[in-house]
């Protein structure tokens, strides 16, 4: 009986040692890359190619500041002609967005994917050209002619905020594919006289209650600057 | 985490509550509204009988109607419109002149035209006794712009 007890005691010690040694293997520290990630929106050149009325590009970049926080910027240019029932106008201008992303995705060790929520401040400088319009009349007794004033409204500005939802997946080493959707809310705009900013570069279509929606599909490359050990 | 999702949804709905702006619901280019009054007692509305109205070289808008007011469109491509008002087979011609001003309304409505410096350049007086302009700017359809006394 006593012998058996001693035997069990030794086995249990062995067991705890082996468990301890396994834990040690698990706690081997992994290194996570910190750096600048730069890329571009691949949907914009495609829509430029498919749609003759739209022309634009956008560069994206972010820097990992803390474990789950990324400072992010977007820079772009848009030249878009919008055709409505009674209006035809061209918007041309550039935009800048800055803010941060917060990663809510818990990665496995060694993985660097993201599902994030972000906030942005957006700023755009642009021109509008009213190419043509047809005065709106009820009925068809007198049919109005379409007028082509080609009025240019220069030096217009807009400022807005965005909430961004997106994800980024590391497909190859340091190469990321990303997709995001943003919900925009206009803070203020410099409106043209006797016209309205119905489209703003970066903000996209301005809805009646000053809301907007944006999408982007990005391809970006991480330039690693340093590696930090993560526990 | 659940709390976070709730916050996200609240944000989503505040941002997504877009209003419809594809359909034009605002008032656009106004018509000219004419009201008919009795020439003997100029405060009394007097109906006109068998009224037929058409613009010069166009189809009729009203045919043999008995009315105390009419609403007629003005030509947006010219700075004048000539109307023929026929009552009981007696014709009268009125030539309206104005300047046009296009005002932006909305995405779906585009521009509306309002008429300023509205004047009567000439009119015949076969059944019309007198005309008075109440409002020389036609930018809405809330009230009559001219009174015709007969």
Image (cartoon, rainbow, N blue to C red):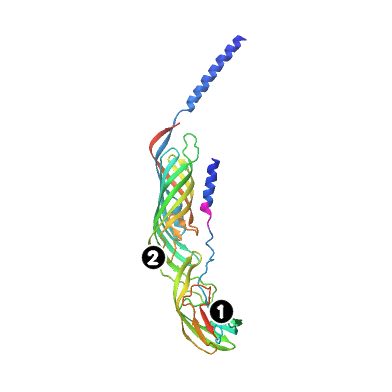
Query: From which residue to which does the magenta span run?
Result: B14-18
For the residue pair A81 and B79, the one nearer the viewer reads as B79
Q: In which quarter of the image is residue B121?
A: bottom left
For the N terminus of chain A, the image quarter is: top right
Q: Is residue A39 something one can see in this rendering?
A: no
List x then y, in percent, for residue B129.
Answer: 52, 88
What chain does mark 2 sit on?
A: A
Q: How far apart are marks 2 and 1 (CA)?
A: 40 Å
List x then y, in percent, for residue A116.
Answer: 48, 43
For the residue pair A149 and A45, the one nearer the viewer reads as A149
Q: Is residue B6 something one can see in this rendering?
A: yes
Asked which secondary structure carries label 2, the reply is strand
Q: Would you say the magenta stretch is mainly helix, strand or loop?
A: helix
List x then y, in percent, for residue B11.
Answer: 51, 49
Asked which secondary structure carries label 1, the reply is strand
Q: How many neighbours does mark 1 have within 10 angstroms: few (below 14), some (14-19), or many (20 or more)?
A: some
Q: Quadrant of residue A191?
A: bottom left
What chain does mark 1 sit on?
A: B
Q: Name the residue under label 2.
A: A152
Q: Name the residue under label 1.
A: B70
List x then y, in percent, for residue A101.
Answer: 45, 44
């Amino acid at each position: 009986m006593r012998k058996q007890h001693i035997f069990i005691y030794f086995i249990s010690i062995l067991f705890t040692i082996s468990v301890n040694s396994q834990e040690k293997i698990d706690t081997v520290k992994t290194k996570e890359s910190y750096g600048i990630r730069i890329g571009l929106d691949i949907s914009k050149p495609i829509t430029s190619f498919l749609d003759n009325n739209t022309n634009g590009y956008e560069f994206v970049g972010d820097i990992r500041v803390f474990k789950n926080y990324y400072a992010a910027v977007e820079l772009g240019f848009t030249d878009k002609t919008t055709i409505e029932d009674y209006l035809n106008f061209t918007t041309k201008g550039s935009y800048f967005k800055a803010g941060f992303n917060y990663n809510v995705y818990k990665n496995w060790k060694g993985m660097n994917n993201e599902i994030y929520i972000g906030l942005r401040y957006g700023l755009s400088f642009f021109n509008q050209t009213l190419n043509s319009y047809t005065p709106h009349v009820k009925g068809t007794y007198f049919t109005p002619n379409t007028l082509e004033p080609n009025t240019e409204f220069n030096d217009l500005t807009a400022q807005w905020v965005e909430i961004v939802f997106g994800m980024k997946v590391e497909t190859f080493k340091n190469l990321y594919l990303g997709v995001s959707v943003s919900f925009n809310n206009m803070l203020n705009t410099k409106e043209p006289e006797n016209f309205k900013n119905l489209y703003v570069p970066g903000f996209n279509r301005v809805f009646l209650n000053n809301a907007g929606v944006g999408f982007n599909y990005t391809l970006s490359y991480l330039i690693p600057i340093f590696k930090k050990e993560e526990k | 985490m659940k709390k976070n999702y709730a916050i996200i949804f609240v944000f989503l709905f505040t941002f997504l509550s877009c209003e419809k702006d594809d359909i034009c619901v605002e008032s656009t280019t106004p018509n000219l509204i004419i009201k008919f009054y009795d020439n003997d007692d100029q405060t009394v509305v007097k109906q006109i009988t068998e009224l037929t109205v058409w613009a010069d070289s166009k189809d009729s808008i009203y045919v043999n109607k008995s009315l105390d007011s009419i609403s007629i469109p003005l030509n947006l491509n010219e700075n004048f419109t000539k109307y023929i008002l026929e009552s009981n087979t007696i014709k009268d011609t009125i030539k309206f002149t104005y300047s046009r001003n296009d005002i932006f309304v909305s995405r779906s409505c585009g521009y509306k035209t309002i008429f300023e410096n509205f004047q009567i350049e000439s009119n015949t007086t076969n059944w019309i006794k007198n005309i008075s302009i109440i409002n020389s700017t036609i930018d809405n359809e809330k009230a009559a712009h001219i009174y015709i006394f007969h």
